[in-house]
């Protein structure tokens, strides 16, 4: 399996659907980075944890949270250019195929 990446027609939203084995590196398709306004995390169930870093698994963490209620979380960013990297070893998803991570671009 692989991480599924869905880009909407206006290219203002990118949605990631993880698998259970691979990290996601945005630099593969967006080497110049993304100007991100917000990140929405839709878990597979309450208690799912997400970890997003900048550039690599060794980069600084810009979003790490546990959705205790399972309703979804949002982080707003100042529209700086980042190179999101999902470090799967620091994420705990009950069912990765039901998780959605959406980046809203400026």
Image (cartoon, rainbow, N blue to C red):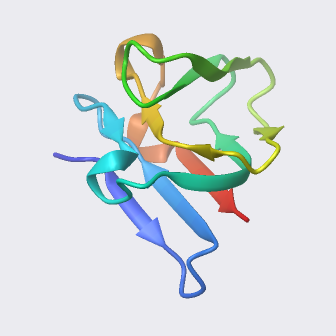
Give residue 76's position: percent from left, percent from top.
83, 42
Give residue 64's position: percent from left, percent from top.
65, 18
Q: Residue at x 67, y 52 (%)?
A: 36
Q: Is residue 38 above or below residue 106?
A: above
User: In the picture provided, is 31 more to the left or to the right than 1?
Assistant: right
User: In the picture provided, is 89 more to the left or to the right than 33?
Assistant: left
Q: Nearer the viewer, residue 94 or 88?
A: 88
Q: Residue at x 34, y 47 (%)?
A: 27
Task: Name the image quarter holding residue 96.
Answer: top left
Give residue 40's position: percent from left, percent from top.
71, 46
Q: Residue at x 30, y 31 (%)?
A: 23
Q: Nearer the viewer, residue 9 or 95?
A: 9
Q: Residue at x 64, y 56 (%)?
A: 35
Give residue 71's position: percent from left, percent from top.
79, 38
Q: Nearer the viewer, residue 100 or 55?
A: 55
Task: Name the image quarter holding residue 88.
Answer: top left
List the single residue furthest toward the bottom: 9
């Amino acid at each position: 399996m692989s991480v599924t990446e869905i880009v909407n027609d206006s290219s203002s939203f990118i949605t990631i659907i993880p698998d259970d084995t691979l990290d996601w590196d945005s630099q593969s398709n967006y080497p110049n980075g993304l100007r991100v306004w917000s990140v929405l995390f839709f878990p597979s169930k309450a208690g799912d944890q997400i970890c997003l870093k900048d550039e690599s698994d060794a980069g600084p963490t810009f979003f790490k949270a546990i959705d205790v209620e399972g309703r979804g979380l949002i982080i707003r960013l100042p529209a700086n250019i980042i190179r999101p990297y999902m470090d799967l070893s620091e994420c705990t998803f009950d069912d990765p195929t039901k998780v959605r991570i959406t980046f809203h671009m400026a």
